[in-house]
Amino acid sequence: MTRDTRDGRVDDLRRQLRSLGYLDAGVDRFVLGSARGARGPSTIAALASVRVGLLAAVLLGPAAAVGIASRLPGLVTGPRDAVVVALYLGLIFGLAAIAFTFVVSTLAARLADGDVRRTRWISRGAGTLVTAGCLTYLTLWWRSANAGLAWSAPVWTLFAIGVAVAISLLLGHAVSITAFAVMTARARSSGGPDADGVSPTDATSRSTWRLVLLAGVVAFAGAAALLVLTAPASGVPGDRPPLAVVSPGLRVKVIAIDGFDPDVFESLRATGAVPALAQLLSGGGARFFPDQTRDPARAWSTIATGQSPDIHGVRGLETRRVAGLQGALMPGSGGLARALNGTTDLVRLTRPSTASGAELRTKPFWEVAADAGMRAAVVNWWATWPAIGTGASGPLVISDRATLRLERGGALDAEIAPKELYDRLRVEWRVLTQEAAQTAGTPLFHAADPEASVVLRRSAELDALQIALSRRLPEKPDLIAVYLPGLDVVQHTLLGAGGSAASTISARLDNIRSYYRYLDLLLADFTRSSPGEIVIVVTQPGRLASAARGIFAVTGVVAAPAVNVEARAVDVAPTILHVLGLPVSRELSGNAITGLFLPSFMARFPVRDVPTYGARPAGLSTGRGDALDAAALERLRSLGYVR
Amino acid sequence: MIAVPAFVADYQVSIDAELRRLVPDSGATVQRAMAYTLLAPSKRVRPVLTLLSAEICGGRRAPALAASAAIELVHAASLILDDLPSMDDAPLRRGRPANHKEFGEAVAILAAFALLNLAFGTVAKAYDPAVASKMSAVLSDAVGTEGLVGGQAGDLLAAGQPIEFEMLERIHRGKTGSLFVAAAVAGGLVGGGHADAIASLSAYAKNLGLAFQIIDDLLDVEGDPAQTGKAVRADARRTTFVSFSGVEGARQLAAELCETADRALRPFGRRADQLRELSAFVAGRSI
C-alpha cells in the first residue's frame, strides 16, 4: 500500500522517476510496444506510427463522423450508418496519422542529430504540434456540428471540449514519444552521443495497453454520446411547433408540370388547342427563373421547401451510396469529382444512387400542412422516398418510387405512406394501369417515328398513372401536390440528343405539341375547379437548355385576374402555405406572393409568420432501398435522367 | 521480512541443476572459479524471472532453462568483475570471500570472461537461429555500455563525489535494471510472447529492477550482514538512493515501483500471480 508523504524530496524524485520512464502506466507501451527490439530508427518509426494510427482511428473516427454527418445531410441515416462512417473516417485518419507520425519522427531524428537537448525539445515540439492541430480540428468540428448550440448548451460544450482535449493530448503524447524513440535510436545507430542516458528502452517500457484501450473506449463513448445528444432536436414529437391555422376554407390542388415551355404553350393557346391549360393559366401568374443546373431533384425540392439547395440539402439527382452505408453522399460535379466517383464505383466503394428524402433537411409544404393538422398528400414528387411515417397526422405520400413498388408488390419499403394506402392501391393496381394505358392510348399521338411513338406513349402512361393514383386517395385532402414528368421526358428524349435532320426535328416538335394537347385532356377533368378549391400550376422548363422561365399560376375564387408578377422558385411553397391559412416561417428563403390573390382575400387573410416550422424529422424512416435501388436507377436511366 | 515465495524453491532447483550441468564444480582452476561464484547460494531472482516470463507467455519451463542460465551466467560474471580491487574492491560476496580473494585476481578475471562467453554459447546452442539472435542482442544490450558495463563505469566515475539523481538512476539501470529487463524479455522471447506481452514484461522488470536496487541501498544502511552477505555501510562513501530520499522516502518509492510493476502485468491477468509474488518478495525482502 502506498503511503502518502509530505516529504518534498520524495515528490521531486517521483517526478524525476516518471520522466525517466518509471512509475508510469500511460500510453507509451502501447505505442512503442511493437517497436521493442527493433534496431533501426526507420523500423521503430514505422512500427510505432502504426500504433499511433490505431489510436487516431479510434479517437478521431467517431468525432469526425459527427462532423461529416452534419455537413453532408443524408449520409448518416441512423446509428448503423454512424458506425460505418466512423469506421471509414477512422481508417482515413488512421492512415493519415501513420504517415504523419512516420514523417515527423523521421525528420525530427534528422534535426536532432543526437543532441540530447534538441532531442527532448523536438520530440515535445512534434507532440505539441499534433496536439494543437488535433484540438483545432476538433474544436472546429464541434462548432460545425452544433451550429447554433455551442455555449447555449454549456455543459455539453464543456464536455465536448474536455473530450477533445483528452484526445488531442493523447495523440500529441503518442507522437512525442515516437519521435523521442526514433531520435534516440538514430543517435545510437550513428554512434552519436548517448542521449543523456536515455535510450529507446526508456521509451518502450511504459504503462499498460489496457489504460490506453480504456481511454479509447471512453473517448469513443464520449463522441458517440455527443453524436446522439447534440443532434438537432428533430424527429421527436415535441419538435412540431404549434401552427395556428386561420383557414379560408379552401382546398388546394398543386399540379407540377416539368418540361413546360411557355412559348410553345402560348402558340397552342392561340389556336385553342389547350383550353384546359389555358383556363388554368388564364389569370396570368408569377414568373420565376428556374434552377440553372436543370437538375430536377434539386429544382423541385427548392420549390417544395421554399429554401435554396444549400439549405434543403438536395443538391443533385445523382448521389453515391457508400458501401455499408444506408445514407447517400452528394458528390461534386467537377471533373475531379467525376473521376473520383468513377474510381470509387470501380472498386465498389461507392455505387450510383439517386437523391432521396433522406437528404432533405427542411420540410416540404405538404409536411408543414400535415403538421398543422391538415390532410395533405403528395404524388410522385422528387425526393419523396422514403415516405416518412410521422404517425396518423402525417401526409399521404405516394413517393417517386411508389410505382416501382406497386408493379413488383412485396413488402413496403417506405415507398408509400401510410401502409393501408399501399394495401389499397396494390389491390387496385391492375385497374389503375389499365386505366392509364387507356388514357395514354389517345389518338392525339400519331407519330411516324417509332422512337417518338414509344416515348409519347410511355410518358403519357406515366402521367396518367399519377393522376389515377391521385384520384384513389382516401377522402378529399386539403392539399394535394402531383408531379407530372411526362412532358419533360418527351421533350428531353426527342430533342435532347440533337443532330437530327430538320424534318425530323420539325416532326418531333409536332409530337411535343401533341403532348401538350394530351396534358390538356388529362388535366381537364382533374383540375376542374369547384367552389372552395384552388388549383395551382407550377411549371419549369425541364432539363433542356432554354431561356424559358417557370410559371406559378393560381386559379380559383381567390385568384387575382390577369396578374403578371416576378417571383422566385423559393416563393412557391410559402404562397401555397399561405393560401391554406398557414403562417409563413421566417426561416424560409421565400415569401408569399400576395399579388396572386384578390385584395379582399389578402385583407381577410393577411400573411402571418412564425419563427420556424421545426426541423424535419430524420431517421424515422424504415426505408432501406436496397431492393429497389437498382430498379429505380435503371428506370431513371431509361427516362434519360441519369447517364 | 517476507520469505522467498514457496514456488521459487522449485524453480531454484531446476536452475541450479542447469547451472551445475553447464559449469561443474571440478576440473581446471578457472572452471572451479566460475562455479565458485555461479553456484554460491543465491535466491536466483533473475533466472526465476526468466522462467516465469516464459511461462506466462505460453512457454514451458524446460526450454527456458538455457535462457535463465544465460542470465545467471552474465550476472555471476558481473559480480566477479564488480568485486575486483580495481572496481569496488569488495571482500565478501554471497557470504563468502569474493572470487578474487579465493582464486586471485587474474583467475577471477578469466572466470568472469568465461562465464560471459558461456552465456552467449548456451543461448546459441539451445535455440533456433531466430530466437538465439534476438536473445544475443538482449544479452549484448544488458552487458554493454547501456547495461552492466555502462552502469559500472558510471559507478566508478561517481565514486567519492556527489552525483545528480539522473546519474544515479543511470548507474542503477545499468547495473541492475538492464539485467532484470533482459531476464524478463529473454523469457518472453523463449515463451513466444508477442510484442505487447514482452513490452509489459519489460515494464514490469524495469520498475522491479529499480525497486530491487533501492532496497539494496536500504539494506546497506540498515540491513543485517548475516542476511545480506555484505558488509553494512559498504556504500557509505557513495551517493545512493537513500541519499536523495531518506530511508522512509526510499521505502515508499520502492513500494510504488513494485506497485507499478504489478500494474504492468494486468494484461496477463491471474497468470502473472507468481510474478506479483516475486515483486512482493522484492519489495519486502528487507523491510
Image (cartoon, helix red, strand yellow):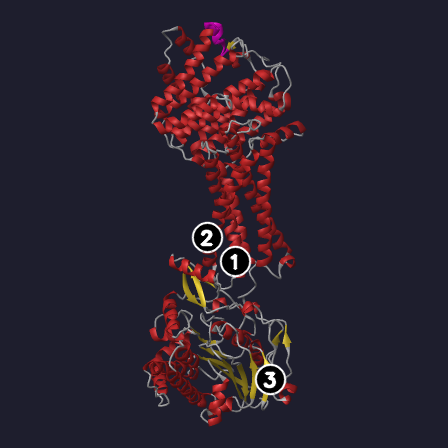
Instruction: Determine crowd level at label 3: few under 14, some 14-19, many 20+ residues with C-alpha closer than 10 A.
Output: some
Q: Is residue B96 magenta?
A: yes
Q: Chain of mark 2?
A: A
- Residue type at tag 2: Leu
Residue occupied by mark 3:
A565
- In space, the residues marked 2 and 1 are separated at their CA atoms by 13 Å
Instruction: Determine crowd level at label 1: few under 14, some 14-19, many 20+ residues with C-alpha closer than 10 A.
Output: many
Magenta residue span: B93-105
List x then y, in percent, for residue A443.
Answer: 35, 90
- In space, the residues marked 1 and 3 are separated at their CA atoms by 41 Å
Dot placed on the residue nearer the N-terminal end, 2 or 1: 1
Placement of A39 over or under A325, stated as above or below: above
Question: Which quadrant of the structure image shows residue A194?
Answer: top right
- Residue type at tag 1: Ile
**Residue nearest the viewer, comparing A574 with A120:** A120
Please state, as top left, top right, bottom left or bottom right, where the N terminus of chain A lies in the image.
Answer: top right
Q: Chain of mark 1?
A: A
List x then y, in percent, for residue B201.
Answer: 46, 31
Dot placed on the residue nearer the N-terminal end, 3 or 2: 2
Residue sitting at 47 percent across and 5 percent down? B104
Q: Secondary structure at mark 3?
A: strand
Residue occupied by mark 1:
A68
Residue occupied by mark 2:
A87
Q: Chain of mark 3?
A: A
Residue sitting at 34 percent across and 23 percent down? B126
